Image (cartoon, coloured by chain):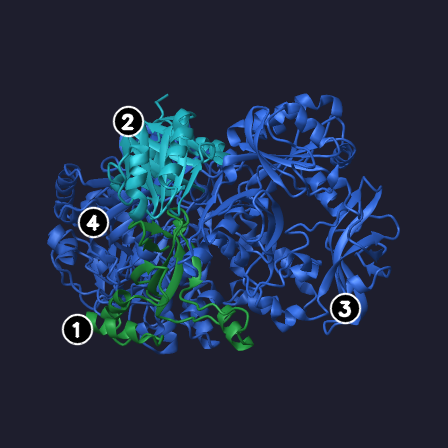
Amino acid sequence: MLTLTCPYCGIAAEETELQPGGEAHLKRFGPGSTDEEFEAYLFARKNPKGVHFERWRHAYGCGKWFMAARDTATLQVFGTYSAQTPHPTPEIVAAIRAHRPDWQPDWTEATADTSAESLNA
Amino acid sequence: MTETGPFRLPRGGRLIDRAYQLPFRFDGRQMRGLLGDTLASALLANGQLMMGRSFKYHRPRGPIASGAEEPNALLGLGQGGRFEPNQRATTTPLVGGMVTTPQNCWPSLNADIGAVNNWLYRFFPAGFYYKTFMHPRPFWKHVFEPIIRRSAGLGKAPTEADPDRYEQAYAHVDVVVVGGGIAGLTAARDAARDGKSVWLVEQTPHFGGRTPTDHADGQARVDALLAELRGMANVTLRRSTQATGLYDHGYLLVRESLADHDPNAGIPRQRLWRIRAGHVVVASGALERPLSFAGNDVPGVILASAVRDYIDNYGVAPGRRIVIVTNNDDAYRTALVALDAGLEVPVVIDARSAAGGALPAAVRARGVRVLTGSAIAGIKGGQAVEAVKICAHSGSGQVTETVDADCVAMSGGWSPVVHLWSHCGGKLNWSDAQAMFAPDPNRPPTGADGKAMASCVGAAAGDLLVPALTGAQAESATMPVWVMPAHATRKMKFKMWLDFQNDVKVSDVELAAQEGYHSVEHTKRYTTLGMATDQGKVSNINGLAVLSNALNQPIPATGTTTFRPPYTPLTLGTIAGEARGEIFQPLRKTPMHGWHESHGAFFEPVGHWRRPYCYPKAGESHADAVAREIRAVRASVGTLDASTLGKIIVKGPDAGRFLDMMYTGMMSTLPVGKCRYGLICNENGFLSDDGVAARLSEDTWLVHTTTGGAERMHGHMEDWLQCEWWDWKVWTANVTEQWAQVAVVGPKARVLLERLGGQIDLSPEALPFMGWAEGEIAGIPARVYRISFSGELSFEVAVPANRGLELWEKLHEAGRDLNVTPYGTEAMHVMRAEKGFIMIGDETDGTVIPQDLGLNWAISKKKTDYIGKRAQERSHMTDPRRWKLVGLESVDGRVLPDGVYAVADGVNPNGQRNTQGRVTSTYMSPTLSKPIAMGLVLNGPERMGEVLEFPVAGQESYKARICDPVFYDKEGSRANG
Amino acid sequence: MAEALAKISQVQDWGMIQIRADLARAGDAIAAAVGVALPERGRITSDGSRSLGWMSPDELLLVLPRAEAAEALAALQDALSTEHALVLDVSDMRAVFRIQGAKALDVLMKLCPADLAAMPEDGLRRTRAAQVACGIWREPGGYVLIGFRSVADYLRGILTGAAAPGTQLDPR
């Protein structure tokens, strides 16, 4: 049973105080999107063994959704962070790389990569 | 001291108090034990060596251990609601007045009919159940299954409710040390000296572990550590407290015995601690392994360490003439303890070619014969050991000598207890030198920070003697012995037990290997090795060593089975904790709940809420009550407690835009002072909730949800606001419980409400249908919504929750002459169905879209987007063959059963009838005096008047004609009063 | 029979006002309007009969004598009239319990997964008590626990049960 620190409250909440919300950073496709785009948005989910980004809600607490970066196999938590970001933050990327040097982000936003490198440097 | 049994020694027993005798019953006989005894030690003292029978062959069984690993001495404990099967006699403290019963035997422990299996063992080989009961197939149901069911299961389940209380508690601790032996005590002291908060939990009632028995000044060493620990404020010591499992992120489950089997203590029997441990130190020691020789299961063959425990701890002689058989030095300690107690040790049989250590020397010095390179060829005796047949270990069992004895103390070496280490992924290394699996410190179980969340110390880490702490001298090496003698015959292997409870023998594991079971996990399930209640504590290593030999591969290549929690069984009571009876689960009650109760309401659960289903009067059936309530509402006026409806405030400059995304319809254009019905879908397009929204002010809406939907819809809104549109300025608040809400419904509703007085103008002009107003009613601040779920003139009145009962009572006082009638959820359901209104959960099941329900009028055509819109454009959602909502009129006057399917021509690939629709709501309508129903039907709206067939097993098919779903007041004039 | 671990009593005369706003922008105005200092994250501030609790990054809970609720509501609405804010009287929405006594923490440790022993003196912790949501803070001699009114009977049941005589958590 996991313990995650709510980035809003700063307290470690255990899993029974939290509500899981599945994969983080999905990009919504609405009317006007192709069938393929919409299908991918609605149904296609990553299922990695290793680094993964998830949504959790501090349901028995402040009620806020937050994101968690963790390893699905070892359950190591690299960090939790605000839900109001389209991609994991540079700090999170740096924390993951510190433990998983070979891990590569799979999003293409250039700024995330460069700032992570600068943090590592 | 014969009062407490003929085998009680005149002296000794460091854990017993000879001043306190405790009477107890076993198998209908009265016996006496001593304070401090376990059940096993008390029974042994009374000469009761045989304590049960094995599972498969019903062979006589005595204890082989003195602790949690015991597979044999399992008893039924207690009576009535406190009866518990499969309790280990070796870990159960004796309590005066205890009533115990042996298990798995009939008609009695001594003369057991099932023991005939024992003579048929050749016909019960490994995989017997899989092989035998396969053919002929028809035999399974009527012959095999009843036989297996009768003989399956160990012990009996209790038949009465458990009268004891249990509780749980949470703790957050820096370091939890599991095991109160010398290694654990030392680890706790070291952690405490570092300033950490430390718990030390010990499964038995005593600290010290093996050290006081096994090492000369052991007790003094333990006492010194305890004295220091007891003086430290940051240390908590808990005895009779069993760590049962270590889970993710340092979550440790621990069961503390508070009043086990002492029902008069007036406190909870057990407490389950749910601990978040910063680090867990596993100091759980090691368990001794049996030796696999023929006859090793005869009562009286006991682990060497257990023999000296019974003598030293309890002053009990497991036998008077004890033969030791071993592959290591440690067992020689048993010889010394036995001799000190005045018992005979005729011979020590040592499989090793030499026994040159200090311990063997000490035993030889006492005049005891030590036979090296020797083995046991067999045991003479059935229900008890009579003699030991000795042979050379290197041979195939040629008997060289027979020695009379009533007890055999065996030691096959030791295995560290690595369960907690392994539960969350800690890895093991095989040590050839010590013939054991020990924790690999480089591959620990890891926690949230990626670092080790557990470490092992002492014997659990493979440091069996812990010389640094015990002062023990080095001992000569253990020689692995997996089968004794080394070249035992096949016939001998049929009598070498690995799993004593499940009757799995060396021959069974070899047969499994021969039949292709190469994986240890498969072999376990095929043979049932390690599947007994001790979960392989005794049998695991011996079994996999035999399997490895049979497969001709080293032991690490075979590996171990998975260690899974719990280490010892948990009572269901501790898992339930406080959740039983009145507080089994939270029941949500409205402010008027007490009134409903005192007026005879029959409640139904709606989520965690309890809502009145109806208010039956004396002698009235529920159906009659519902019909009466409906007639009263339609004729005059009724009241419904609608407080459970969800109420969510949505406020902000972007609130309108936000609600337009939440609802399928347009909410931003709703004028202040008006209400609008709306549908909320999920992103899959499926209808999720419905309700009426009211615009309170320019930037504020009040959203009503279904009773079950309040928390869900509030969460849904917050999800989209926080995770998708976080720059939109919208606040939401779930104020469901701030308000009590009463629906005042019926042609006399206005008359009744006006009688209560207040400043709200309730006239049709001032408060038209789908309008709302604010003010006071009966002196209570209120909001009144003119909305209707029944088709009648209807006002929903919301007042602060603390004043809900006051409003309700005033309505009933003021409306007595109007026959104002409280009505429940069933009347509400029937009335809405009479009007063809859908109900979330009846007409919807998570696969239904609003378009299926003829609700296109509630879907905005103008909006470019709303949650679910894109999904509703998918080809499957726009398929004209989707089943659509219609009314269903029973042809023969019978009420259609709920959920039944309408059949179509032909059959599907499984040979089942094709279907073309199903019933979603069905009632007897008191208003129309006929059955009414709604359903989803293929092309339904275009098939008015067609008759559908609904087959029901064992009955004549139901038939119903497709019709308009609005059965009553199609013009909708009644809502205007 | 030994005494209960703590005295459980229900409070009936408290008012509560829920405030949602951008606390960085509106915090000072709120504090001025209610006469209690703005609490830090996870804390509750008190001044006389009023307390102001931090419920989330954009939510505060004002606890005050019920008779003062209407006036405080108006003052807050006035103070926040130019802000994007939500101020609601939620005085009827909750059940409030006092857990008073030397072993009050034992009672809560049986019900809440939160580390309440480590909670700061002026902390406010939202967590769960057995199966329902709750908020907890300290007061002299014990704790205050708030939950939803519909489960008041349940809360009383679990609190009273956890406080049963003889069930202190000390090792035996």
- Which subunit holds the residue at mark 4? B
Q: Read off the residue under disc 2.
A: C48
Can you tell which of label 1 and label 4 is closer to the viewer? 1
Q: Give SS at disc 3.
A: strand
Residue B776 in the image: above or below residue B175? above
The residue type indicated by label 2 comes to Gly
Question: Would residue B609 appear left or right of B294 to someone viewing this image?
Answer: right
Judged left or right of residue B22, residue B75 is right
Mark 3 or 4 closer to N-term?
4
How would you rate the neighbour count of disc 2 (Cα within 10 Å): few for under 14, some for 14-19, many for 20 or more? few
Q: Quadrant of residue B929?
A: top right
At mark 2, the secondary structure is loop
User: What's the chain of the residue with tag 1?
Assistant: A
Q: CA distance from mark 2 to mark 3?
A: 73 Å
Real-space Cα distance between discs 2 and 1?
53 Å
Disc 1 crowd rating (10 Å Cα; few below 14, some 14-19, many 20+) is few
What residue is disc 3 on?
B914
Q: What's the chain of the residue with tag 2?
A: C
